[in-house]
């Protein structure tokens, strides 16, 4: 079966675009994590820790789960420098970051989508089944945010943000990657998986889809 993505766009162009989105997503993750530290009045070091953990934590979990060690951020320090840059920017802007929160949410969604999809691709290469691939992809996307919230003494948002699909969106994207395995190239699987994450985030933010909550 011909691969529609590979035939429509050059492979190098797609890879370059994904790399750029990966970098932007890393910075957005760092800024969102650092912003929590700023709001909780952490000092500069604390803000840097939260920002960097949010930015590279998910990728580190992904690489560890898929046996790709040492984690990418240690082999390619570009990601760590980007995380530091994003954290410093959030610290410098402080409360003025509120003006950029909408843009950060957009890039955060792109980062979530790509991290979930790449985590699923790595799990597929290890021969994991549907649950393993979904688990690895989901943790890759939300792992950094979970560690951030725990360090900041917050209940992880992925456990209660029912009106905005986040971990569920990452799981849907990772499962999509698994279901498309063998039907198209890895790069096209990644694009489709990431697209499902973005779509799930959009429909949930519009209030069209919500997770049920048990009334007690």
Image (cartoon, rainbow, N blue to C red):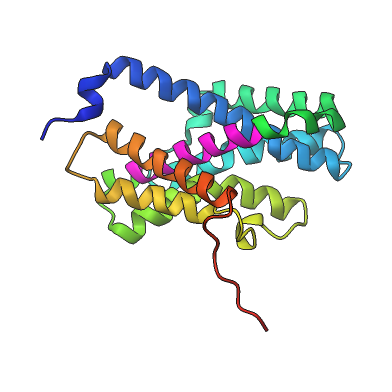
- For image coordinates 48% across by 20% down, the residue present is 20
Indicate left or right for 163 with 33 as reference.
Answer: left
Compared to 45, does 199 lie above or below?
below
Q: Decide whether residue 117 is among the magenta residues.
A: yes
Q: Position of residue 158 (x, y in %)?
A: 60, 57
Q: Decide whether residue 4 is among the magenta residues.
A: no
Indicate left or right for 57 with 69 as reference.
Answer: right
- For image coordinates 58% across by 49% down, the residue present is 206
- For image coordinates 34% across by 53% down, the residue present is 175
Please identify the quadrant where the C terminus is shown: bottom right
Residue 68 can be seen in this image: no
Farthest residue, direction bottom: 216
Count of labels in the image:
0
Dividing the picture into quadrants, the one containing residue 155 is: bottom right
Indicate left or right for 215 with 76 as reference.
Answer: right
Q: Position of residue 78 (x, y in %)?
A: 55, 21
Residue 161 can be seen in this image: yes
SS majority, magenta: helix
Compared to 204, does 25 lie above or below?
above
Indicate left or right for 139 with 100 as reference.
Answer: left
Question: Where does the magenta region start and end?
Answer: 104-122
Q: Position of residue 181 (x, y in %)?
A: 22, 45
Compared to 209, does 186 lie above or below?
above
Q: Position of residue 8 (x, y in %)?
A: 24, 20
Please identify the quadrant where the N terminus is shown: top left
- For image coordinates 53% across by 35% down, the residue present is 111
């Amino acid at each position: 079966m011909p691969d529609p993505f590979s035939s429509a766009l050059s492979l190098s162009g797609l890879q370059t675009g994904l790399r750029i989105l990966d970098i932007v997503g890393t910075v957005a993750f760092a800024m969102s994590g650092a912003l929590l530290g700023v709001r909780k009045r952490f000092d500069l070091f604390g803000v840097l820790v939260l920002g960097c953990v949010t930015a590279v934590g998910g990728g580190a979990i992904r690489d560890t789960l898929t046996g790709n060690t040492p984690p990418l951020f240690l082999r390619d320090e570009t990601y760590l420098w980007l995380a530091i840059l994003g954290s410093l920017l959030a610290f410098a802007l402080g409360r003025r970051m509120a003006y950029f929160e909408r843009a950060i949410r957009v890039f955060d969604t792109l980062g979530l989508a790509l991290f979930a999809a790449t985590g699923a691709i790595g799990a597929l290469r290890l021969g994991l089944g549907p649950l393993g691939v979904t688990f690895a992809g989901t943790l890759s996307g939300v792992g950094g945010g979970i560690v951030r919230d725990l360090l900041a003494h917050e209940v992880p948002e992925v456990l209660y943000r029912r009106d905005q699909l986040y971990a569920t969106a990452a799981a849907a994207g990772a499962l999509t990657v698994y279901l498309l395995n063998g039907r198209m190239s890895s790069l096209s699987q990644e694009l489709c998986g990431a697209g499902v994450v973005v779509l799930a985030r959009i429909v949930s933010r519009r209030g069209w889809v919500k997770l049920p909550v048990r009334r007690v």
